[in-house]
Amino acid sequence: MKQLSTKVTSNAHGQDSSYFLGWEEYEKNPYDEIKNPNGIIQMGLAENQLCFDLIETWLAKNPDAAGLKKDGQSIFKELALFQDYHGLPEFKKALAEFMEEIRGNRVTFDPSKIVLAAGSTSANETLMFCLAEPGDAFLLPTPYYPGFDRDLKWRTGAEIVPIHCSSSNGFQITESALQQAYQQAQKLDLKVKGVLVTNPSNPLGTMLTRRELNLLVEFITSKNIHLISDEIYSGTVFGFEQFVSVMDVLKDKKLENSEVSKRVHVVYSLSKDLGLPGFRVGAIYSNDEMVVSAATKMSSFGLVSSQTQYLLSALLSDKKFTSTYLDENQKRLKIRQRQLVSGLEAAGVTCLKSNAGLFCWVDMRHLLDTNTFEAELELWKKIVYEVKLNISPGSSCHCTEPGWFRVCFANMSEETLDLAMGRLKEYVESTDSRRSISKSSHERIKSLRKRTVSNWVFRVSWTDRVPDER
Amino acid sequence: MGSLKKNGGAILSRIATNDHHGENSEYFDGWKSYDKDPFHHSRNPCGIIQMGLAENQLCLELIEGWIKDNPKASICTPEGVGQFGDIAIFQDYHGLKEFRQAIAHFMGKARGGRVTFDPERIVMSGGATGANETIMFCLADPGDVFLVPSPYYAAFDRDLRWRTGVEIIPVHCYSSNSFKLTVEAVEWAYKKAQESNKKVKGLILTNPSNPLGTMLDKDTLKNLVRFVTRKNIHLVVDEIYAGTVFAGENFVSVAEVVNNVDSYEVNVDLIHIVYSLSKDMGLPGFRVGIIYSYNDLVVSCARKMSSFGLVSSQTQLMLASMLSDDRFVEIFLTENSRRLKIRHEDYTSGLKKAGITCLTSNAGLFVWMDLRHLLRDRNSFESEIELWHIIIDKVKLNVSPGSSFHCTEPGWFRACFANMDDDTLHAALRRIQAFVSKNHKIVENSSDSDQIVQSNNVKKQKWKQSNLRLSFRRLYEDGLSSPGIMSPRSPLLRT
């Protein structure tokens, strides 16, 4: 009899993908300004490290929150014992208001419809458990966050069917792509339970347009299925256009209390907007009572630490802090993104025009030897080992076109970003001159590399362990 | 399995709509009553006293004192805020190295230093709730079976089965031998399951036991390890009460047995431990669950799954510091045992005065009370529930009926003693004593003329008991209504 479950031996956790393997290499040789200046610079980590000083300043001014006190009285004991899966009421209220503020207070969030979870990782999995049976499918636009393969499918048994998006229209979702995905699922004999989108998008850094959002709402209405909108980057919008949430669209279409609104669920987290992934704060927002009820019970498997809830309820209840923070966060992200974009431009590399997120979707198709994923992997290897930058290849995000890479910009200092851009520029310039080598020797090298790459990928697919990230 | 909810056609999953979360059970009626009318010394002295909550509130001030004295352990204080950024971004599912080391160290100390734990095998989870579910996901597929000795922690029905699809089959234990788990009973349950073509993947037990408060002896544990090895099934031992042992023999962890049994008799790949700081330290709010497995594949898989329930890095940092403070840990563990022992003696001697005995126990945060003599019908669970409603409505105590722990014999109740202060405990005891003696008086006054001289103790006892039951019948006939159902404010976790 097989000793362990099928989940142990399957690789549905998705961690054999190149997305995670680049990290392994980084871990072996991490860049450090002083200790390891020639190490690999981590650009595969969608973290927001730009505004910690604001939070640290707030902490210095708010000793009660720091000292687990309320109105000067210690509440340590209450917090130590607090494990109610309804969550700390003050925290949910503050979180709801923060979510409203991010959306310009155009929509309201009812704290009683919020379910806390251990990060959006847990929130997304929990929603799957609530909405899908094993074997049911959710449609996801590509490219998408690699971790979804684990979060949505691994323990739930749900399936993902891609909605193919292409560079021809900036990777926007089209009606035909949606219908095609739905039909593909049916061909595969999979029951479609819903669509899941990340808005703003990871890895694209773009926001869904109103047209796309309307299309999605109409689609789920006609098919009578769910829509999950993972809006964890909603507070990272730094362009001129404002963020349009699916909640905005429901309101504008006067669908707020309709049947369809019960099938629209929002996922949120403080890991990106506030840069606090370590604190494991995720949330599900749903208009469906049964979903809220079931998800609340399931949150028992991953509650938010009470001391963390308390700290954050104090932080987010301070409206002066939240408005300053959101403003400053936006400004700093914009500056940093511009720095990356111009650095790339100087290396002759363009990226998808974007105004949100902690990364850019970079077009390196012109650097590929051939228009294939093998070539993409080859290029990626070079960038990791020779250029010493860990970036994420588009294939790991299920992109259908080779040559796109996600490059993060908010998890390092300005100087490190400059250095990274300098390295890239050097590499591109040297590649340009290398391309004048004779074609025949190039073909020889290419086939040798192909074999080497596939051996290497096979070998590393057995290695374990990588940190968890978006 | 529960109907699928139709939402204009779009359906939710079976898991979302069935009741395998277990929260519709009568077990929660007591809580609902408590929530409506909670005891408070000054604000509501006649309210219901909560004795259904296995919390450890006895040593929290020690922890609070340590936190005050060690501001560097917090990322929020001026002394500790320098670490804020690094900790805020830390989401590596291996956990902070110092945290794993400190936990491994603490686990060893809680077992008297008789065994050491390897920090590399420590895997985080969302409390023991998350740990138990995760270990099931690693060891069993939907439809597989795990054996669990009864009586067992009520929430296992949810934690082990709900989203995993695993089936639980109880291994019944009986009062005739003090509810001790025997290998024979496990073997029998295993055989029966196999005869029904069920795939048994393992045995899971809580040691020290919830709700019994007793520990497995070394020989039984050794024999269980040998048994699972012979049958090639897993053994998961939930040791979350390991540090609550307050008297008698030392606690024997399965880790100790693994080290002391001949290597050909134990396949360590089958042995897994679940731990948590919710009971030993009284910190359920901090959600610190641990899986410790001797099986490398399970460690690896559980670690990936821990992404769904990592411990907050803020909490990891604080505990890493606290639990590596040897001096504090020693004082804490000693004081914890001492206070639990006093509280246990206090409570059990008070119960004795009311003619109530408990299963002899030396661990846990509760006692297993024998109230069989108060049942209207000793063989009926309806009687147990009736009695329970009387205890809630008349005696104003929320205790937990044995049926909610899947006990096969009616009349046993779990009462917690470590989740309140001394005054509240004494108030609870006074109520019990007053109630029992009031009903005794009624019996004595009305039965004088009917008294028949009995020739032996058994008959006397039966008469006394039957008259007590008569007096309860009066109460039963007073038209007690069930507490109204309202949406629970308290989670299933509080058991």
Image (cartoon, grey):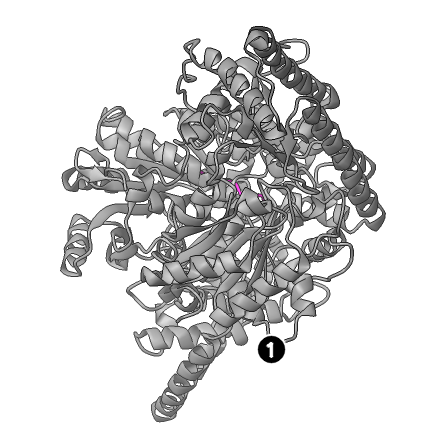
Q: Is residue A287 magenta?
A: no
Instruction: Tell me the subunit letter for badge 1.
Output: B
Residue B129 left/right relative to A133: right
Task: Report the span colored magenta.
Answer: A279-283
Q: Is residue A365 visible?
A: yes
Residue B11 left/right relative to B99: left
Amino acid type of the residue tagged 1 in the rendering: Tyr
Residue B80 left/right relative to B454: right
Query: Residue B193 appears at what percent x and percent y?
Result: 38, 59
Residue B350 left/right relative to A371: right
Q: Is residue A281 magenta?
A: yes
Residue in the image at 81% along x and 43% along y: B334
Q: Is residue A241 visible?
A: no
- Residue B460: name its quadrant: top right
**Vertical position of residue A447 compared to residue A257: above or below:** below
Helix, strand, or loop for circle 1? loop
**Vertical position of residue A377 compared to residue B373: above or below:** below
